[in-house]
Image (spheres, rainbow, N blue to C red):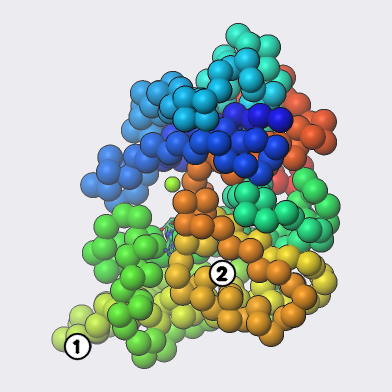
């Protein structure tokens, strides 16, 4: 079974070819980070324009690297949402055009289902599994009772983890996207500054906006008093607060739902501190396998969309040519 995956939900134009749901034959990503950097974040109109320019090239490159033609493809999996609507539309329309022209089945995929199933490219998924999704727009714990089923047991009530990283980075005058820079700085400092942790006891929900404000206030107050705060210590303290809450809640959920695996997912899964802390914490929960995808499969890519699409296609899910980009797509309902 050969699946062509296409992803254009945000600022990466990506296409990949996946064999039997697990083998990556090609995985091409054209990143737009350089174009958005000077604006300090993703500019939707610029993202759409870049997707238009890149999509055909990226798809052709993916087919070429996989050494296949359109005739070899069994299904096209494309991100239908959530994301920027103008960006989503480019991928969806490219997928529809190819599907129509070559008579290939089409499968719409939820972007976060893609992030979660990136783990399938590493290891066979065993259910029930729990996924900790930490990305630019999402922070949630998703329970997978069986293949292709998603139940959100907790989610952020305000900022996503990645969003908090990017905003804190901006306050420290670090370039966009700030996550990797904070991660690097955090390893050079010590977590000596007291910052809050939003435990939200009794739920698996998260909150990061209070922490973000505390970081900004700490900097501001120090500035007013003429005191100096070492950015690396602030980064280390911020990162420790984020990680402590993420890891503690994840471990509780793993125990409560008695899952077989924990699937780490999303761009913030690239965080070295988080990866190390989870690895350490899972030593205390024997029998539960921790799966952490390599960095290239944590940030946006189309291999993950192909992997998720393959599961849905096997389950008989197909989209028709009325498929549309849906910025508010719900993972439990799609
Ligand atoms: P979503 O997947 O929710 O739609 P997105 O696709 O924009 O959002 P991703 O591409 O999955 O998000 O992840 C991007 C985010 O990951 C950014 O906020 C970035 O700062 C963050 N990130 C990347 N690497 C790291 C890192 N090492 N530490 C912390 N954050 C990181
Ligand atoms: Mg991105
Ligand atoms: Fe993403």
Q: Is residue 294 visible?
A: yes
Q: Residue at x 76, y 26 (%)?
A: 318
In the rendered view, would you say 98 is above or below 204? above
Badge number at residue 52: none
Residue plotted at (66% across, 29% down)? 2
Q: Residue furthest front?
A: 67
User: Can the viewer see residue 84 in this picture?
Assistant: no
The numbered dot on residue 207 is 2
Tell me where residue 71 sits by quadrant: top right
Residue displayed at 43% across by 38% down = 29
Image quarter where the C terminus lies is top right
Residue 269: x and y in percent read 52, 62
> Badge 2: few (under 14), some or many (20 or more) residues near its Cα, within 10 Å?
many
In this picture, residue 110 sits left or right of residue 90 = right
| Residue at 66% in and 82% down | 283
Secondary element at tag 2 = loop
Q: Residue furthest top?
A: 101
* 31 or 297, nearer to the observer: 297
For residue 232, what is the image quadrant? bottom left
Q: Report whether 330 appears left or right of 195.
A: right
The correct choice, above or below, for 187 with respect to 18 in the image is below
The percent position of residue 193, horizontal first and vertical second, equals 37, 88
Looking at the image, residue 319 sits to the left or right of residue 15; the answer is right
- Find numbered disc 1 in the image and state the secondary structure of the residue it sits on: loop
Q: Which residue is mark 1?
A: 227
How far, Cα to Cα, is label 2 from label 1? 29 Å
The image shows residue 306 at horizontal and vertical percentages of 62, 37
**Residue 115 coordinates in the image, percent (x, y):** 59, 50
| Mark before the other along the chain sequence, 2 or 1 | 2
């Amino acid at each position: 079974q050969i699946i062509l995956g296409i992803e254009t939900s945000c600022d990466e134009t990506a296409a990949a070819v996946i064999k039997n749901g697990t083998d990556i034959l090609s995985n091409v990503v054209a990143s737009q980070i350089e174009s958005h950097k000077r604006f300090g974040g993703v500019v939707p109109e610029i993202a759409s324009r870049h997707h238009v320019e890149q999509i055909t090239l990226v798809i052709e490159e993916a087919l070429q690297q996989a050494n296949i033609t359109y005739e070899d493809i069994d299904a096209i999996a494309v991100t239908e949402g959530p994301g920027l609507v103008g960006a989503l539309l480019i991928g969806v329309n490219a997928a529809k055009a190819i599907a129509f022209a070559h008579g290939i089945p089409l499968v719409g995929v939820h972007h976060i289902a893609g992030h979660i199933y990136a783990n399938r490219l590493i290891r066979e998924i065993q259910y029930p599994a729990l996924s900790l999704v930490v990305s630019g727009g999402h922070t949630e714990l998703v329970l997978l009772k069986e293949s292709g089923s998603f139940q959100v047991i907790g989610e952020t009530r305000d900022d996503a983890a990645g969003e908090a990283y990017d905003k804190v980075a901006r306050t420290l005058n670090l370039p966009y996207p700030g996550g990797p820079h904070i991660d690097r700085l955090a390893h050079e400092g010590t977590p000596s500054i007291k910052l809050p942790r939003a435990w939200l006891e009794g739920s698996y929900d998260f909150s990061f906006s209070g922490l973000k404000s505390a970081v900004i206030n700490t900097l501001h107050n120090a500035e007013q008093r003429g005191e100096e705060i070492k950015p690396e210590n602030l980064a280390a303290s911020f990162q420790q607060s984020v990680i402590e809450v993420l890891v503690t809640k994840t471990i509780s959920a793993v125990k409560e739902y008695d899952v077989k695996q924990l699937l780490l997912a999303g761009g913030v899964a690239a965080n070295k501190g988080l990866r190390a802390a989870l690895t350490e914490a899972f030593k205390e929960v024997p029998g539960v396998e921790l799966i952490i995808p390599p960095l290239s499969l944590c940030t946006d890519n189309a291999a993950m969309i192909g992997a998720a699409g393959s599961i849905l296609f096997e389950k008989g899910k197909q989209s028709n040519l009325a498929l549309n980009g849906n910025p508010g797509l719900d993972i439990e309902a799609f």
